[in-house]
Amino acid sequence: MRRINLQKAKNEIARLNTIRDINRQIVLNYVRDRSPISRAEIARQTELHRSTVSVIVDELLADGMIVEIGSGESTGGRKPKLYELRTGVPVAIGVDLTPRTTTIALADLAGNILQKETFSTSPDVEFMTAQILERTRRIAEPFHDQGIEIGMSVPGLVDQRSGKIFHIPYFNWRDWDICKRIEEETGSHVIVENDANATALAELWFGQEKTRKIDTFLMILVGEGVGTGIIFDGQVYRGEMGAGGEFGHMIAGDNAPVECSCGSRECWEAYASEKALVARYKSLLKIDDLKQSNIDIGDLIELAVNGEKHAVESLRETMHYLGNGISNLIVGLSPQIVVVSGKVTKAWDLYKDELQRVSERSVLAGLPQTELLPSTLGESPTLTGAIGLVLARKFGSMS
């Protein structure tokens, strides 16, 4: 579903058979993005007829999607009633599978987490199937009659339209039928997406104002691997059979500190991921200094922020390779903005100048500079993206 750009909303107002649905979505998006807002203000900003707005607002109130929250200031007549999204009521379940943990969360229409549980991810696909089915069913069961949908984010190759998960390289899982199994278990519709695409979607819907106001940007997800989400014209670009944006596997060298999830030491992922950062840090330490055999990436980032020299050096080298890859993407795609997401953004101030320098050298003469920004989605952007898969169906354009 394409996100409606409110800056262009007047151009979206249909005069064909889809007028009712599209105008309803425009009104809902105005309430979402600009609440508290009155009927008169919606009509003024969209140039929809006031009676049309009034009918739509009444429908949204009846459907439980928005609520009246009081009255605004009078401009001469009666005080206008103000509206906002209805929150606190479950409308979506997000299932977020990562190489280390899996999270299942219940969320409302604004994306607020109402209930959440996290457990360790196992390489045993049958075990994980059983765990996800049982936990999702338990969370969904109390809301069986409320039409709750489920969004799922996975680190692998997905055909979003058919709901098929072809391959998760980290565990070498192939043709995983989890979505069909969840639908059979819960009776709820499941939407599945690659984790980088889900995170790009989260930036589009829940990110900072700059990314929510534009239609074209790239999102770079730095985690156990490196993923890229591409937003063109307010939509996620997926490519043939969902394989678009797999830039983590572009060639970046021939002797990376770790193997990529595909087994190669040539991929960008093998140079610029969290596991590459950890490997560089370990290589700089003397054996006697390394008391923790499996240092947590969060602890390593904190060490860098606090100025520990090995952590700082490892981070800067890793971000140098991240910047080289971003440079290639800027040359090839010329996005307005590149958003970097993941735990490494906690140390943004340590390497932002290096990334900006790399981006500047990539811009062809006369073209505007691409802006690099850290994500504001926190430590669980893919979970937000999983939930966003459902919410995008409620807010997104039909076209």
Image (tube, rainbow, N blue to C red):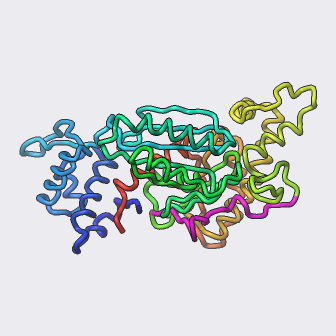
Q: Quadrant of residue 175?
A: bottom right
The percent position of residue 4, horizontal first and vertical second, equals 36, 61
Vertical placement of residue 387 versus 216, above or below: above
- Picture residue at 18% right of the left edge, 40% below the top: 72
- Picture residue at 57% right of the left edge, 64% below the top: 242
Which stretch is magenta? Answer: 235-254
* Nearest to the observer: residue 358 or residue 169: 169
Quick one: which residue is furthest to the left in this view? Answer: 77
Q: With 378 as the anchor, is 317 left or right in this view?
A: right
The percent position of residue 22, horizontal first and vertical second, equals 27, 64
Q: With 145 as the anchor, is 285 left or right in this view?
A: right
Q: Is residue 224 magenta?
A: no
Q: Is residue 239 magenta?
A: yes
The percent position of residue 296, horizontal first and vertical second, equals 73, 32
Count the labels in the image: 0
Looking at the rendering, in which quadrant would you find the N terminus? bottom left
Would residue 208 be visible to someone looking at this image?
no
Would residue 18 be visible to someone looking at this image?
yes
